[in-house]
Amino acid sequence: MSDSDKICVIDVGSSSIRVSVIDSNFNFVKIYATAFLPTTDADGVVEFEPTELRTKVLELCNNAIIDYGVPKGIGISNQRASAIVWNRSTGDPVFKGISWQGLRTVGECLALQNENFRLAPNVSASKFAYVLNQNPVLRDEDLCVGTIDSYVVYCLSHENNSKTGTHITDASNVALSGLVYTNPFEWNSDLLKKLDIPRHMLPVVTDSVGELAVASNLKGSPPILAILGDQQASLIGQSCVVAGDTKATFGTGSMLDQVIESKPSIYGQSSNGTIPVVAWATNGKLTWGLEAVMLSAGSNIQWLKDNLKLISTVEDANSVTCDYSQSSDVYFVPGLSGIGTPNWDFGATGAFFGLSLATDKNKIIVAVLDGIANMAADMRDAMIKDSKLLIETLKVDGKMVQNKVFCQLLANACEIPIEVSGVAEATTLGVAYLVYLQLGYLKSFSDIQSLYKPSQIIEPNGHSTREKWAEAKKRALKWIPELSEISF
């Protein structure tokens, strides 16, 4: 196979940057990776260095090109809703990047509710405004505002001797910016005016796949052919391309996403706690999805290691034993950061129920895994209520699915088969599919569907703990009433 058959996919996550070289048989030839950790100097403040992001992306891409030649195309996947503001001529940031995890604009978002603007602090809109508010002269300068994908494209396309790079973003990222309502290709003028974000600073909204830009800052100037938010990329990576297809990613938190049949009837959070998203955009046509959110999933395992010292490594949780034929006597509510879908209760708490002198370390770890599984079942139930589409099987990926006990508990809680992704990097694979679709190696999304190969299918095999667990969760809700009253 020639070098020209290979592509590169850039994946900027919440803790790492990866550049994967992938061939037209969808083999991962090599992955170049480096840490990209945010800083948390104060409550609600989660930041990162955009210059570090630029340097590391270019370095990894250049290393890939040195080893494997100029790629036939480039794709980008990214953590969504993080915010960067930079100088249009130089590409240099004017402030630190603000992570999607940052909550410093909670007060501003609550104040906006009094003026009928509902804006969550984790989306990028209020973060852009925050940066511009740091210096009154910034709004008079020639700046760009954008999410991670926007800045990566800009850095790839901005040569040192040029005045500007390409400033774009795709519809899947824009739909989670808070700056659009029912049409992701149209910025909301009222909100821009309220936040005082100059329209000329915003990127051009594009399809998720196409001749989007040219990476002229790299050798050979390869084309940028696909951009997609990470959760939407995972959808495609697990071949979820038709209405009803559903996947869940279990990382630090968990996102459950489903492709739906048509445009949602509401913009923003539903009464069942799901959120409409653009799954992808092709030829100006939007494919919509719904998303449910678990605020803490794998972070509970990290907590067992770092805080409770019950395990030495997070991988130790993979070796627990569980008797699926018996009902559990210990229950855990994974509300360490509050509870997302379906309740969206920031005043909920993490809680154990059923502890006794007979409770040992193994039972506690299994209870934590089972609590995460039951929370995922709650998200599944909320999704069905909103989409009116059955979920007869659930495709899963993320680090937690390496735990066989967790996957079995998930199947038991959801009472449906669980299909484990055949690749660890489903997000990267999803973007690779789009790049090869644009290159003509794949003819349609149906070809993507035919490529699906789960590593295993896990059937339910034991008692459901849903009834008792639901009672435990009920007691954990509204533990801090003043926080429980907050809603975005």
Image (spheres, rainbow, N blue to C red):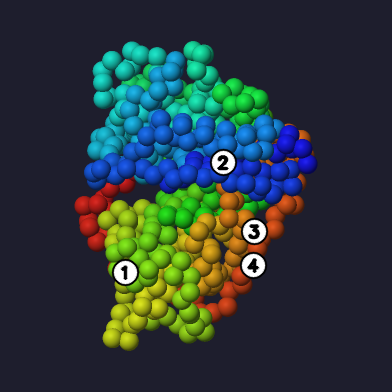
Mark 1 neighbour class, 10 Å CA radius: few under 14, some 14 to 19, many 20 or more: few
* Above or below for 309 versus 249: below
Looking at the image, residue 306 sits to the left or right of residue 205; the answer is left
Instruction: Identify the amino acid type marked 4.
Output: Ile
- What x and y, as percent, mark residue 297? 42, 59
Within the image, what quadrant is residue 35 found in?
A: top left
Secondary structure beneath dot 2 equals: strand
In this view, the residue farthest toward the front is 66
Instruction: Identify the amino acid type marked 2.
Output: Val
Instruction: Identify the amino acid type marked 3.
Output: Gly
| Chain-order first, disc 3 or disc 4 | 3
Looking at the image, residue 400 sits to the left or right of residue 358; the answer is right
Residue 19 numbered tag: 2
Secondary structure beneath dot 3 equals: loop
- What x and y, as percent, mark residue 163? 49, 13
- Residue name at image x 69 percent, y 49 percent: 27
